[in-house]
């Protein structure tokens, strides 16, 4: 018989996570109200990148179609008219498709009564919605900007995350993140 301490091997001991593995606790809760879905979807119209992409693609297609019409002997007036119609039609179609896509995405998480929560610590931000929990390391945030009723976070991996303004207003007081505001 030895005097060595005995260990109980009948129940395994759970490893205790250190602070680096712990998810930040929830500090802010928000419930989507009627109209939040509409406001978030229309926020897409306030993004410059959305307009530039739609108009540039429409312009390029309009110029190409107009040039083809002029080159095939339709004449300048008809070629310009057809190119202009393609520009307007394609630009409008892209705008409407983007709005529809934004509405489809937003309706999953911004329907009236949907609960959101957020929390943060010195190194990470946590965002919960009815679909998932997102934990973002603060050093991975390249920039963020307010677009209507949403904050749009640009991450280093190229991902873009849109979050209701009510969840991240407290983060704006953080001087490390204040430098990232566009």
Image: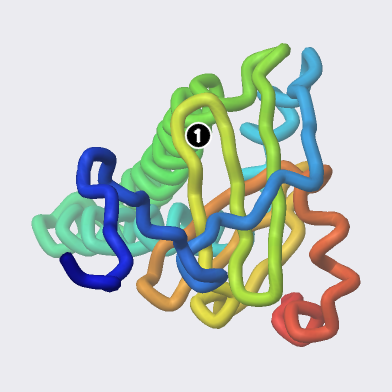
**Residue at the spot of label 1:** 102
Q: Which of the image's four quarters has the N terminus?
A: bottom left
Instruction: Please report the residue visible at 36 percent of the width from the left and 50 percent of the height from the top.
Output: 14
Mark 1 Cα-neighbour bin, 10 Å: few <14, some 14–19, many ≥20: some
Residue 123: image location, x then y, percent: 61, 75
Quadrant in the picture for residue 125: bottom right
Examine the rendering and report whether any part of residue 92 can be seen: no
Residue at position x 13%, y 56% in the image:
73
Q: Is residue 116 left or right of residue 179?
A: left
x then y, percent, for residue 140: 50, 77
| Most distant residue in the left direction | 72
Q: Residue sitting at 80 percent across and 43 percent down?
A: 28
Helix, strand or loop at mark 1: helix
Residue at left offset 23%, top offset 62%: 64
Image vertical order of residue 6 relative to residue 137, above or below:
above
In the rendered image, residue 23, in percent from the top left (x then y), is placed at 55, 55
Q: How did the renderer colour the structure?
A: rainbow
């Amino acid at each position: 018989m030895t005097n060595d301490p005995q260990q109980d091997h009948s129940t395994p001991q759970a490893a205790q996570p250190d602070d680096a593995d712990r998810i930040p606790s929830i500090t802010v809760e928000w419930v989507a109200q009627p109209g939040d879905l509409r406001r978030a979807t229309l926020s897409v119209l306030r993004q410059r990148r959305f307009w530039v992409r739609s108009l540039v693609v429409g312009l390029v297609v309009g110029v190409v179609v107009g040039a083809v019409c002029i080159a095939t002997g339709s004449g300048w007036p008809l070629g310009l008219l057809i190119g202009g119609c393609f520009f307007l039609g394609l630009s409008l179609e892209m705008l409407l498709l983007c709005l529809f896509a934004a509405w489809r995405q937003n309706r999953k998480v911004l329907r009236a009564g949907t609960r959101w929560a957020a929390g943060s610590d010195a190194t990470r931000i946590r965002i919960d919605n009815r679909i998932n929990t997102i934990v973002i390391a603060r050093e991975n945030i390249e920039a963020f900007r307010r677009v209507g009723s949403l904050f749009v976070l640009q991450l280093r991996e190229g991902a873009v995350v849109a979050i209701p303004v009510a969840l991240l207003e407290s983060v704006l007081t953080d001087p490390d993140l204040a430098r990232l505001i566009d």
